[in-house]
Image: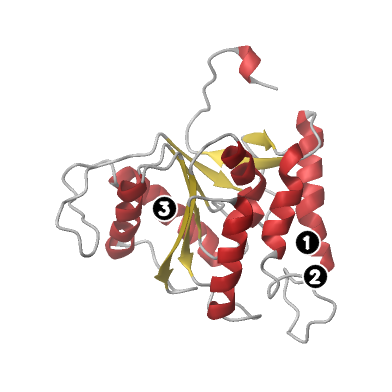
């Protein structure tokens, strides 16, 4: 299956928090979007990997993505090496996305920056014809494929975006997808330990960040991204 957009996240819920509105909007435009989680989030203080599996499937249904897979890399301990790069290359070649979205280039959680660099490097290497890969159980070798662009969504840190996407009509769907991870976020009745993302302030911050980015570009809500190369436009009318 060829996808238009492939979204990577180091943990289940990264994609929803960083780009949930953009994902929902692109799906509504008829784009085929997929999500790949690098880990199952098994080191998370609250919940469990099994619970996160169910929550990520629920969130995928809310966003109506075409596919969601989990690489089952080691949460907290995966590294950007040949073995991990080859596994990501297989996914890029499997789905042949034109656009890849992935973790923030710099963030509080060490997996976010690691995942960002791992995916970015693998996307480049995926275009090299002398790297041979094939999916497990398949006989045919995969063809080389390099996405046109790799964009990085913003996470915990307030990085300055290079561009922002208007998600004004999709903030509710983004919020619903985030709240599908009931084990992770604010629940006044939970007996689980408190974490930096389990407070009401954190979940509120997702909304007011989107509102503030929207304000800056003249819309109600927006999500910001950083780029690896200059953004080109066909004409000035492409800018809002």
Q: Is residue 157 left or right of residue 93?
A: right
Q: Percent from the top left, x then y, of residue 189?
A: 83, 81
Residue 197, can we see it?
yes
**Which residue lies at the image location 59% right of the left edge and 34% below the top edge?**
29
Q: Nearer the viewer, residue 193 or 20?
A: 20
Mark 3 vs 2: CB contact within 8 A: no
Q: CA distance from mark 2 to mark 1?
A: 7 Å
Mark 2, residue position: 199
Q: CA distance from mark 1 to mark 3?
A: 27 Å
Badge 1 element: helix
Mark 1, residue position: 203
**Which residue lies at the image location 24% right of the left edge and 59% below the top edge?**
135
Against 147, is 63 above or below? below
Q: Nearer the viewer, residue 226 or 19?
A: 19
Mark 3, residue position: 119
Badge 2 element: loop
Q: CA distance from mark 3 to mark 2?
A: 30 Å
Q: Percent from the top left, x then y, of residue 53?
A: 54, 72
Q: Percent from the top left, x then y, of residue 79?
A: 39, 66
Picture quarter with the C terminus: top right
Badge 3 element: helix
Mark 2 vs 1: CB contact within 8 A: yes
Residue 43, can we see it?
no
Q: Is residue 31 left or right of residue 25?
A: left
Q: Nearer the viewer, residue 117 or 211?
A: 211
The mark closer to the camera, 1 or 3, is 1
**Which residue lies at the image location 19% right of the left edge and 49% below the top edge?**
131
């Amino acid at each position: 299956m060829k996808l238009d957009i492939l979204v990577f996240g180091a943990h289940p819920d990264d994609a929803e928090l960083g780009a949930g509105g953009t994902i929902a909007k692109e799906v509504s435009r008829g784009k085929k979007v997929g999500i790949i989680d690098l880990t199952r989030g098994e080191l998370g203080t609250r919940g469990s990997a099994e619970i996160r599996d169910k929550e990520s499937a629920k969130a995928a249904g809310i966003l109506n993505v075409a596919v969601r897979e989990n690489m089952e890399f080691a949460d907290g301990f995966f590294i950007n090496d040949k073995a991990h790069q080859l596994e990501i290359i297989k996914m890029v070649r499997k789905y042949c996305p034109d656009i890849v979205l992935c973790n923030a280039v710099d963030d509080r959680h060490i997996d976010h920056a690691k995942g960002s660099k791992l995916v970015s490097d693998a996307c480049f290497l995926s275009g090299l014809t002398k790297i041979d890969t094939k999916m497990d159980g398949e006989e045919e070798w995969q063809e080389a494929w390099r996405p046109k662009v790799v964009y990085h969504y913003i996470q915990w840190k307030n990085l300055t975006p290079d561009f922002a996407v208007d998600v004004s009509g999709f903030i509710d769907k983004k919020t619903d997808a985030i709240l599908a991870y009931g084990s992770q976020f604010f629940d006044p009745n939970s007996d689980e330990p408190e974490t930096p993302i389990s407070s009401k302030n954190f979940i509120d911050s997702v909304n007011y960040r989107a509102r503030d980015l929207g304000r800056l570009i003249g819309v109600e809500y927006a999500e910001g991204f950083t780029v690896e190369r200059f953004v080109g436009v066909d004409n000035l009318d492409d800018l809002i």
